[in-house]
Amino acid sequence: MKLYECRATPNPRRARMFLAEKGISVPLVEVNLIDGENRDPAFLAINPRGLLPTLELDDGTRFDEVMAICRYFEELYPVPPLLGRTPVERARVESLQRRAEFDGMIAGSEVFRNQHPKFADRSLPGAPQQMLPAIPELVARGRAGIARFHDWMEEALAKSEFLAGDALTMVDITALCAVDFHVWIDIRIPASNVHTQRWHAAVSSRPSASA
């Protein structure tokens, strides 16, 4: 088994944090996404979509998408539960995790990919034949999404220790990776968002945050 990833980018970090919280060790294979190594024929032979992270099982089965990888390991190693403990919790984690993805991760990606010169011809993730040129107008929309993300987090964290309740879940992992990714585009948690600042310090201090 091995996990193809890029240490510098946020989606592979989400998978690494999830595995670290579970105490699971998987060999990592570095693929330099920033310089476009994920678009080279060698990696496209492994994943024609060119996406990271990609998990390869011992029998050769491969799949991408962070949540697919995390669900696979949650099924194998249910403790500690990071995707919810009951049907209601699992639905809540799924819902809030998607919110963190859209308003946090995807909004940040819109800003980053549509203004960074190395992504001028790849504003969306994917293989070379799927490339789209940057759309500068999407930068403003991404920034608006991040502002909405900050408002949601502050409201939620005023009511509970973590974003989905009293225990760390995938919602917090996705949100932390989004917040730290936003530093690359010079966006940070507003100083007035004291509950989010408290949460960020606490989650960042966990060993998994540096995995």
Image (cartoon, rainbow, N blue to C red):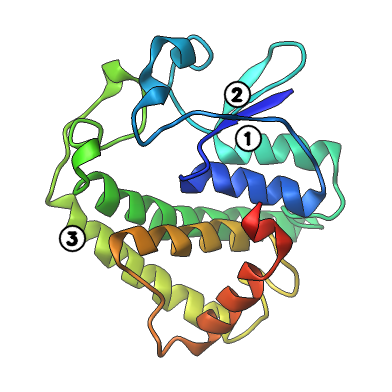
**What residue did someone put label 3 on?**
140
The x, y position of residue 67, in whole percent, is: 60, 41
Question: Looking at numbered disc 3 in the image, what kind of residue is underneath it?
Answer: Ala
Location of residue 29 by image quarter: top right
Whether residues under marks 1 and 2 lie with C-beta atoms below 8 angstroms apart, the answer is: yes
Where 190 sits versus 179, above or below?
Answer: below
Q: Cα distance, mark 3 to mark 2?
A: 33 Å
Q: Which is nearer the eye, 82 or 178?
A: 178
Q: CA distance from mark 1 to mark 3?
A: 30 Å
Tell me the element at label 2: strand
Q: Amino acid at mark 2?
A: Phe
- x, y (%) of residue 39? 37, 20
Q: Which numbered disc flags the more N-terminal residue, 1 or 2? A: 2
Mark 1 vs mark 3: which is more N-terminal?
Answer: 1
The image shows residue 199 at horizontal and vertical percentages of 60, 77
Q: Earlier in the sequence, mark 3 or mark 2?
A: 2
Mark 1 vs 3: CB contact within 8 A: no
Q: Secondary structure at mark 3?
A: helix
* Residue at image mark 2: 63
Figure quadrant of the N terminus: top right
* Residue 68, label in figure: 1
Up the image or down, 152 lies above or below 26; here it is below
